[in-house]
Amino acid sequence: MSHQLTRASFVWATLWDIACSIFENYNTLGSVSPHGRDYLWACGGGMESHTLRQMIAGLTGCTVRMRGNYRQSSAAGGAMLCGRALGRQGIVLGSPDEVVPDAGVDYGERYAEWKKMRKSLRTIFTA
């Protein structure tokens, strides 16, 4: 490994791997049921990272939206469904935070490099 790598390099690489994996799943789901919107909703603790959301936005070409209660998204969603079932108004969620795709970065080229590296690692670890 290069001596020029820092802790930040490893954090960035980890976030990039997560973003690319999410993008792979997004594409797989899109092949079954096309998305058709110019935004995605994000939730969960990992989405605290603005960098991760920016990477996902760049890869998908969609704005990534996230509400302030993203940490408890399962509980909030369950409460909303219960409210609907009981004929009551849902939870007031407030306006979402949005991250738009960064036009200045070529995510497609970086993604192709990631796929190539993943393929080469697969051959190493399955041998």
Image (spheres, rainbow, N blue to C red):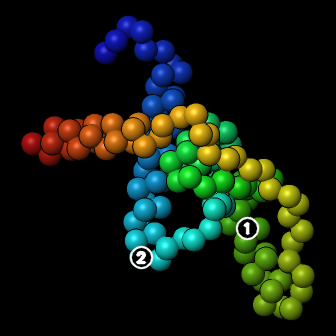
The residue nearer to you, when weighing 26 against 87, is: 26
Q: Which residue is mark 1?
A: 75
Rounded to the nearest angstrom, the CA distance separating label 2 from label 1 is 28 Å
Q: Residue at x 86, y 91 (%)?
A: 87
Badge 2 density bin: few <14, some 14–19, many ≥20, Cα 10 Å:
few
Q: Residue at x 70, y 46 (%)?
A: 99
Q: Which residue is mark 2?
A: 32
Sequence order check, earlier mark of 2 and 1: 2
Check disc 1 and report its element: helix, strand or loop.
helix
Q: Is residue 73 above or below residue 17?
A: below
For this view, does 97 lie left or right of residue 102? Answer: right
Q: Residue at x 79, y 77 (%)?
A: 80
- Residue 38: percent from left, percent from top: 63, 62
Q: Quadrant of residue 41?
A: bottom right
Q: In which quadrant is the C terminus drawn? A: top left
- Residue 6: percent from left, percent from top: 48, 15
User: Is residue 52 at all visible to an observer of this figure?
Assistant: no
- Residue 67: percent from left, percent from top: 78, 56
User: Is residue 3 at all visible to an observer of this figure?
Assistant: yes
Nearer the observer, disc 2 or disc 1?
Answer: 2
Q: Residue at x 47, y 77 (%)?
A: 33
